[in-house]
Amino acid sequence: MMTALTEGKSPPAPPGALEWIRKNLFSTWYNSLLTILGATLVYFTLVSVLTWSIKTADWRPVTVAPLLYMVGQYPREELWRVGLSMLLITFLVGMSWGVWKQYVRAFAIFLGILLGFLAVFPLETTTITLPIRAVMLANSFLIYLGYRIGRLRSVHGRHVAILWLFAMLLIPLVLLPGFADSTLLPAVPTTVWGGLLITLLLSVGGIVLSFPIGVLLALGRRSSLPVVKLFSILFIEVVRGVPLVTILFMFSIILALFLPSESRIDRVIRALMGTVFFSAAYTAENVRGGLQAIPPGQVEAAKALGLKNFHITSFIVLPQALRLVIPTLVGQFISLFKDTTLVYIVGINDLLGMGNAVLNLNPQFVRLQMEVYLFIAVIFWIFSYFMSYASLQLEKAMGVGER
Amino acid sequence: MDRLSHEKIPIWRDERVLKAAAQIISSLIVLGFIFWGIGNFLEITQQRGMALSYEFLNEAAGFPIKESFIPYDSTMSFGRAVLVGLINTLMVSAWGILFATLLGFLIGLMRLSTNWLISRIALAYIEFHRNIPLLVLLFLWYFGVFTQLPSVKDSITLPGPMYINQRGFYLTWPQLSETGALFGISLVAGILLAIITWVVLRRIREDKGKETYFGRVSLAVLILLPLIGWFAAGGAPLRFDVPVLQGFNFQGGLHLTTEFSALMIGLAMYTAAFIAEVFRAGILAVQKGQIEAARAVGLHYSQILMLIIIPQAMRVIIPPMISQYLNLTKNSSLALAIGYQELFAIGKVTINQAGRAVPVFMLIMAVYLAISLLTSIILNIYNKRVQFIER
């Protein structure tokens, strides 16, 4: 029996490298031509980009003021508060890696290596002091520490989620703004906040706040109450029909005219309100897609069991619907993250605004826009890429589209 | 049993009462909020003496607009200025949509290629553009590329001739000459007649089952009629308007400013990445069995593409494509940041000049809403026609 098996045809050998190249690059004459054209294109693009970025490009606008890009004008003596926030966040990223594994792993490892690298990166500037480098390095270790803790059997996803919620309340409401009459945490007005700090605050705030509003609007749009339905449809369609810039302008200029004349709302809060307003309408439409995909039998079965409407929605319909639309929602949150750059147009110094501020810092920088905007593009690219990567992993794990 | 069914349901558990109450309360909250806002607004306007009217639209605008597709100067009215802005928005969106669609289809095709390298190049393009903000991309194009072009004197010359410099593109552009009217008419007639022939002959074939060669016949009409017009006109009906350097600037030809070009290229390249993905998803949604079955009944490749793949893929492609086109149009409002004066930018100048923030703002929002609604209505009608009729 054994001999019969071994004497038979051996299974085909795994394709070698040459075989793979022939099959995927040179299968027909026009494919060979395309490969050669493509390779030439890639070669010249890479060579010219590399020579430009090493030889021609002047990276001084990026290296001269790294802190401006990160935190804007946040008072340097109060910088420890940003550092502490960062330590808290990296620790939680580590814990998330330990708990949610593959969704966060790539980002956590990348972040750890990047921060460690930045900690020892030689810069000719004196603004990056030794304590800052120490905090950077500590971040890397905290990611690993968080990972080890997150892997403990007694730590669950909901613990980490609660900690995240806690951090999201503590950092933007207590730690960063401080209090008017406190010596430990003196108030820091939002006018001096800037850079990546503002970008991240606006996007995380926008995502967290717009989600529940969006879900409510989606439910409202499918409600059996005509008035509620009408309001929801009007809101969703009007907001989706106009550009985000107009909404941001509405909140930054027009809103003040509709409030009592003595009231003043902080301009970062106004920008956040605009972002939430805009994002909620899109979240609502995405969630509605999920709601429509739930077969009516689910609701009927729940009704037959005697569940109340509220319980049917919150225990039967929403959990299933939300799970279906997670990938779409992540996609929408990525575009929200990118769209936060628009607050620059209403005069808030986010990452992009800081880039422009640095360009105006020194007359020598006047023609170095390419370097600055590329640097900013890379930062956005990294965050967006890891978000879409996590969403892809999630999609695979849930088997959306396979059921 | 009898007693139970006659027992009145208490008010707080009567579903009709509860529903009515919920609606009244929610509308009271929403309307109350709106009226409170309007009340505050009226108070403020009275204090500052701003009347809520659109009469200012007839007043002289008093600000110049850099580029306009209709005659405009600063003595004309605010209404005219807003119209110029609207036309600028529509122009940049239309060109952007055209190029985004072409580029998106090309990138989508490359992504579907069996050639590994080509597919990866397309992937790199898509990943680059999808993960950076549009505003940063626009800045990269405008400040990083267009403002750093050489001055007018040292223009880059491309065959055509076409000149590229700090002030934008100067293209050689065909124009109808004095004898061109006949050619123009015959061209339009040719296009119209070709469409009619196509539709009529195709219907005849569908009804009678007889080959009418509708494709070839209408193509012949499309070529022949303008050709007759060309020769009947006597002399060249088209004249090439060549840009010439006169003094410090180019005269003649088609001039695209740097702002317009940067905005159009940025919008088109950004949206193309999304369109490529839409296109790819549409093609992949056509089941393999469909193509195999078509091959089995003996259709050749172009027939499979035209009759099997494209009609089915279109059903999947059109709805997301509509939203991409609308996104592009709405995103053109970012022009404000690079100084192209479209609807929103002009609206902002108008607010500064006329001091009527709310009316101007409402006008701008209404125009954007109208564009969005109109586009989606038209495309939804088309979408309904190509969708599968479900039984």
Image (cartoon, rainbow, N blue to C red):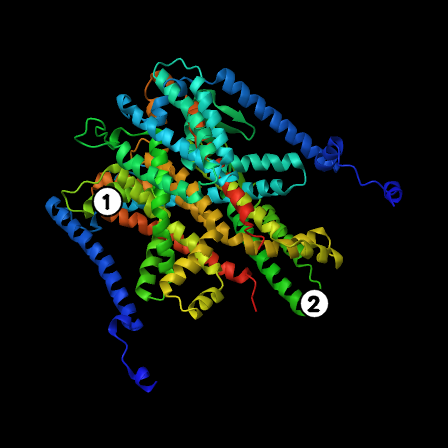
- In percent of width and height, residue B107 lies at 58, 40
How far apart marks 2 and 1 lie (CA) works out to 64 Å
Q: What's the amino acid at mark 1?
A: Ile
| Residue B298 visible in rendering | no
Q: Residue A249 or B216: which is nearer the viewer?
A: A249
Q: Which chain is disc 2 placed on?
A: B
Q: Residue at x 58, y 60 (%)?
A: B196
Q: What's the amino acid at mark 2?
A: Gly
Q: Residue B185 or A252: which is nearer the viewer?
A: A252
Residue placed furthest toward the front: A154
- In percent of width and height, residue B225 lies at 60, 52
Q: Is residue B107 above or below residue A75?
A: below
Q: Which mark is residue A314?
A: none
- Label 1 Cα crowd, 10 Å radius (few <14 / some 14-19 / many 20+): some
Q: Secondary structure at mark 1?
A: helix
Q: Which mark is residue A254?
A: 1
- Residue that numbered label 2 is attached to: B209
Q: Is residue B326 left or right of residue A165?
A: right
Q: Residue at x 22, y 50 (%)?
A: B54
Q: Which chain is disc 1 placed on?
A: A
Q: Is residue A395 left or right of residue A314?
A: right
Q: Is residue A10 above or below residue A236?
A: above
Q: Is residue A92 above or below residue A139?
A: below
Q: Is residue B358 left or right of residue B271?
A: left
Dots 2, 1 in contact, CB < 8 A: no
Give the quadrant of residue A127: top left
Figure quadrant of the C terminus of chain A: bottom right
